[in-house]
Image (spheres, grey):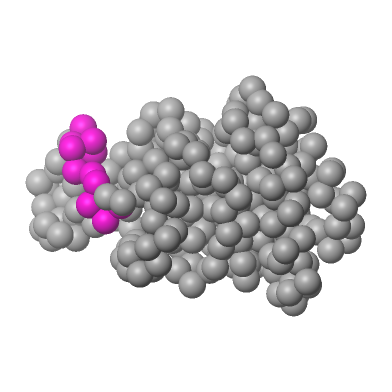
Amino acid sequence: MNSMIIDCRSGAGFFSNLLMILDNLKFCEMRNMKPILRMRNFIYTDGRDKLWNHYFQPINDSATEGIISWSDFFKVYPFILVNAIGAAVFWEMEQRKQDTKDHRIAVNDICKRYIFPSDNIKNIIDDFKEKNFNGKILGVHVRGCDYGFYDMNAYINKINEKISNYDKIYLATDNFETLNLLKGIYGDKLFHYETDIRMPNFKGPVLCFNTDDKLKHGEDVLIEMFLLSNCDHLISINSNVPLFALYYNKDLSYDMVHRSGGGG
């Protein structure tokens, strides 16, 4: 069997890379090729070679024949994600319910075969869920900072529409202003995962990046996605973190507070 090296795109976000990796995994399946995952160009790296195995369960660790250069990475997509490049088109499919459902099932099929958290990260997720995920959970993902959508009332109004049907709110956000505001409104009903990758304010101009510990930054982003995928309903903006949660859990219902052209 020939092999194909799948490498990450330098400078892209965690889930921008992961979505394109799914495309390439599908490409390998279609051509009966063995995928080799490498993350040397991943911005969430500490320099190690087999970084994939830090975040996820191994797929294949070596290639012995028929290696295809990682430069072909940009030539093979889109296949399964043809309707989701940049996440924006996925959300545009909201009104085409069957198309959206079929698309999520197809992507979820790839996730179910390849995307499993590493033992260490799975232990963190399971421990957090055991301590906090009791009852019905409303997941909320608020991305502000560099994203350009700063209408907090849109999130609050949507939460208030839903909250009577849920026991708790799990909040994933990139800034402390949002965390403090929603904690003040919803009190002990709201809980969150502790992470250093939050900016002070809801409004821009940049997204926080932990340059002191890039590996930990990547871990936190990944853990938040898995936790969102375990909620009973999701409220979010158009962003690749909640997008991947919806792919990972194809049955997760959602409301979107705003569409934009970005990914992230």
Position of the N terminus by quadrant: bottom left
User: Residue at the spot x=74%, y=45% of the render?
Assistant: 153
> Residue 2: percent from the left, percent from the top?
11, 52
Q: Is residue 45 left or right of residue 176?
A: left
Furthest-bottom residue in this view: 135
- Label total for image: 0
Can residue 175 be seen here? yes
Closer-to-camera residue (138/229): 138
Quarter of the image where one finds residue 11: top left
User: Residue at the spot x=49%, y=67% of the render?
Assistant: 249
Residue 5 colored in magenta in the image: no
The relative height of residue 92 versus residue 7 in the rendered view (above or below) is below
Quarter of the image where one finds residue 57: bottom left
> Residue 90: percent from the left, percent from the top?
40, 52
> Residue 258: percent from the left, percent from the top?
57, 45
Can residue 63 be seen here? no
Q: Is residue 119 left or right of residue 171?
A: left
Q: Is residue 171 left or right of residue 120?
A: right
Residue 80 colored in magenta in the image: yes
> Residue 68: percent from the left, percent from the top?
14, 41
User: Residue at the spot x=35%, y=33% of the render?
Assistant: 9
User: Residue at the spot x=77%, y=42% of the render?
Assistant: 178
The relative height of residue 192 versus residue 77 in the rendered view (above or below) is below
Which segment did they paint magenta? 71-81
